[in-house]
Image (cartoon, coloured by chain):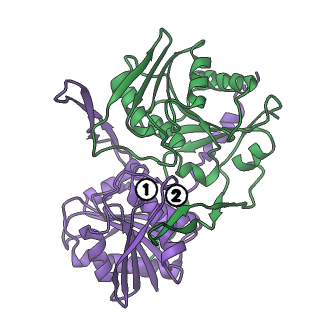
Chain colours: A green, B purple
Amino acid sequence: MNVLLTNDDGVFSDGINELAVFLKDYYDVVVVAPDRERSAVGHAITMHKPLRIKKIKDDDRLKIFYANGTPSDCVKLGIDVVMDKKPDIIISGINDGFNLGTDVLYSGTVSAAMEGAINGYPSVAISLEAESKLSDKAMLYIRKLIDNVARNGLPKNCLLNVNIPNVSDEFNGIKITKLGQRNYTENFTKRIDPRGRDYYWLAGKVLENANDEDSDIIAVKNGFISITPIQLDLTMYSFIDNLKNWDMSI
Amino acid sequence: MNVLLTNDDGVFSDGINELAVFLKDYYDVVVVAPDRERSAVGHAITMHKPLRIKKIKDDDRLKIFYANGTPSDCVKLGIDVVMDKKPDIIISGINDGFNLGTDVLYSGTVSAAMEGAINGYPSVAISLEAESKLSDKAMLYIRKLIDNVARNGLPKNCLLNVNIPNVSDEFNGIKITKLGQRNYTENFTKRIDPRGRDYYWLAGKVLENANDEDSDIIAVKNGFISITPIQLDLTMYSFIDNLKNWDMSI
């Protein structure tokens, strides 16, 4: 089985390298990842400058490339330029830090998996609680999930978003979840530079919304690995009939 | 009524300035837009460098600011830093070029409206067919839409995505639509630089998928202004029960 691996923390981050080394014992792994950190780039793609690719490892079961693009660029490059065979699965991660609830809209990790799904490949985004270490048990769950995706497939225009809490080997198991709600308050910190001019840092404290038991946010809080199916179709079908009744005559 | 206006083509582009000048006859308009083009940035936000804001117009009904951030940054800055009163509506556009179907996932224009919705404000993204001129009639439709949004509100976590075809004043009217499917083929063009090294341009030809009559792609093709309700919740609820049946024991 051919696995295409990417991330948004960059090709030299721990998460992607640990996962690559683990997976190459079971699958043929090709890494195509950004040359540097590209967090919070959302689903950005690079249209206005040329992209370059560099190979830095060429083993039998593990090849590693980096590119000067975004996570989504790397997925496109992996499929169209780098890989001889098409991938059987595309994995984005392991991200250093959760991608939960509303935050998936900002996430380069999740967007890379979206790019995989747009191109018709089974795709999975994997994120680990910040500043924690991936346990052996978490690795086994990831492998089990990959085997399930290979065997069962995923619906068209669907990807999986996986979040792993920092509970070493004491997981309470897996939970299939919906996306929770996460909002921020106090978005900016204002400072004054040495020349007396204002500038702003995006800060933002998490507002703990009331979230349902079956949300990803509550699942990881309770020590479960959260798996959320994500769809590419953003249409709010439930509001279409209501909109049709608006008076739009001019 | 207070309108916050942003875009991804940059503060000096025609689309946003024409809209601002039109809207200031009816509303109090504050523009906070990127200092340069930020197309295809998706829902990127700027976490790792400071943001700066500059005021370039300070009329009674129209104030214009630019910032060195993404469209989503500009929305956050507009709400939290620039505006004295909170906006009654947030408008992103008018973008030079459609944002249809799957492409909304890449769009800075749509992501700015998503950011507005995340923050709880009624938000609308507006895009115009590339290289065309906004007609007076299109302006009247936009004003009618804003009045409808103000009067009727929008559901929580919902925004509107509007696309206007280049048919001058001969619109066939408005169509409420779902997002269509748009895929690309031949993603990259390979070239060789003067030093003999490969590089790649993201190119991509639109693959004309078969799209339904009620999709945004077909609506604009048939000369209608398309209005699609977009939701922030990406959960694919229909696949949750199926996923729960996967054997995830390790």
A38 or B178: nearer the eye?
A38
**On screen, residue B149 above or below B198:** below
From this viewpoint, which residue is outermost toward the top?
A: A60
Badge 2 element: helix
Q: Residue A237: image x %, image y %?
A: 52, 58
Identify which residue, A119 or A73, lies in the foreground: A73
User: Does the residue at mark 1 contact the one at mark 2 (Cβ under 8 Å)?
Assistant: yes
In this view, A92 is above or below A81: below
Is residue B156 positioned above or below B249 on the image? below
Amino acid on which disc 1 is placed: Lys
Mark identifier at residue B105: none
Q: Amino acid at mark 2?
A: Tyr
Give the Cα separation between the discs numbered 1 and 2: 7 Å
Q: Residues within 10 Å of mark 1 (few under 14, many from 20)?
A: many
Q: Can you give x and y, in whole percent of width and height, for residue A214 in the image?
A: 75, 48
Q: Position of residue B223 (x, y in %)?
A: 25, 63
Identify the chain of the residue marked 2, using the numbered disc in the image: A
Q: Which residue is mark 1?
A: B178
Residue labelled with disc 2:
A237
| Residue toward you, B157 or B211 | B157
Q: Residue at x 23, y 79 (%)?
A: B136
Q: Is residue B72 left or right of residue B36?
A: right
| Residue B43 in view (yes/no) | yes
- The answer to whether residue B223 is above or below residue B147 is above
